Amino acid sequence: MIEQKRKLGIIAGGGDIPKILIRYCLDHQIDHSVLAISGNADETFFNDENCLKLRIGQAGTAFDYFKKQKVQDVVMIGTIRRPSLSDLVPDLRTTAFFAKIGLKSLGDDGILRALVKEIEQENMKVVGIHEIMPEILLSQGILTKTKPDKQALADIERGVEVAFKLGELDVGQSVVVQQGLVLGAEGIEGTDELIKRCGSYKRKGSGGVLVKLRKPRQDMRFDLPTIGLQTIENAHTSGLRGLAVHAGNALIVQEKEVIKLADKYKMFLIGINPAEYMS
């Protein structure tokens, strides 16, 4: 865990995790300042005096704000939708950043790694949310009353194989497998849309399984695989029978509620070590 005496800067995107982190900081008296990304962060939540709203292209203003706030650690958390042209209009600092990294770094993770380097050159340390609230990491083992049967375990093994190879290519984190058949793999659309799409492809018989892994070279400080209540709802609607998620390398939002909902739908949720499913 990070030292609680250090000032934390939160770069907040969409979803519930930024709000959960901020409430955690308030409850544990962690001094913090927030940059909320316009068009992504919840507009009704991020409206107090301890928050600055910015477009993605305003890196210069962001650095100046964090310096003024004497931020020492920075966490980037929440979803960021693909920006519009107006979002991308850059200030001078952002223009210099893109000129420096070039087009070769514009993969899913490359631009984030470059951004981390840029932040740390400003004498701020980039940290992962798990370093602040470690209990948000999904633990290993079966978390629900329902357990995966022989077919589900075989589907998990197949899903691990495919997800690992996709991760090596920096493509996505999730796949859906049913009775040995890969129904879909995550692309730019994200896990929720993948699950919805696969609902149209499901076969008769026992339902499919979602396998979600951290990419092999993915930095633990950002964009970790994440599941929450909406993941379970979507999985149930699409006829999935369970989820297998990378233990210790993925985030679970509102864990007790997620497990309770999975139990209600008689779905399984298991935290896995991928190495145990690879030959």
Image: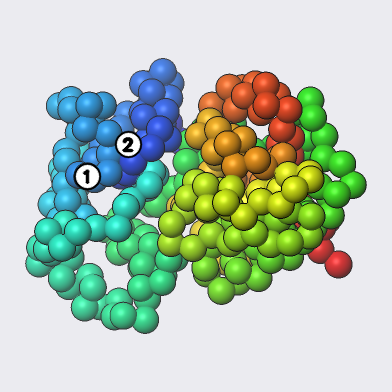
Which of marks 2 and 1 precedes in the sequence?
Answer: 2
For disc 2, the neighbor class at 10 Å (few under 14, some 14 to 19, many from 20) is some
Disc 1 vs disc 2: which is toward the camera? 1
Q: Nearer the viewer, residue 98 or 253?
A: 253
Residue nearest the observer in this picture, 279 or 239: 239
When the figure is inspected, residue 244 is found, relative to residue 254, above or below; the finding is: below
Q: Which mark is residue 7?
A: 2
The secondary structure type at the circle numbered 2 is loop
Quarter placement of the C terminus: bottom right
Query: x, y percentage for residue 110?
Result: 41, 70
Q: Is residue 216 above or below residue 255?
A: below
Q: Which mark is residue 179?
A: none
The amino acid type found where label 2 is placed reads Lys
| Residue under the image location 72 percent in, 39 percent down | 241
Residue 252 vertical placement versus 106 (above, below) = above
Q: Say which residue label 1 marks.
A: 39
Q: Is residue 8 visible?
A: yes
Q: As drawn, is 195 to the left or to the right of 146?
A: left
- Can residue 211 be seen at all in this image of the molecule? no
- Separation (CA) of disc 1 from disc 2: 26 Å
Determine the residue positioned at 66% across, 51% down.
202
Q: Where residue 127 sits: x, y (%)?
A: 44, 48
Q: Above or below — where is 13 with respect to 87? A: above
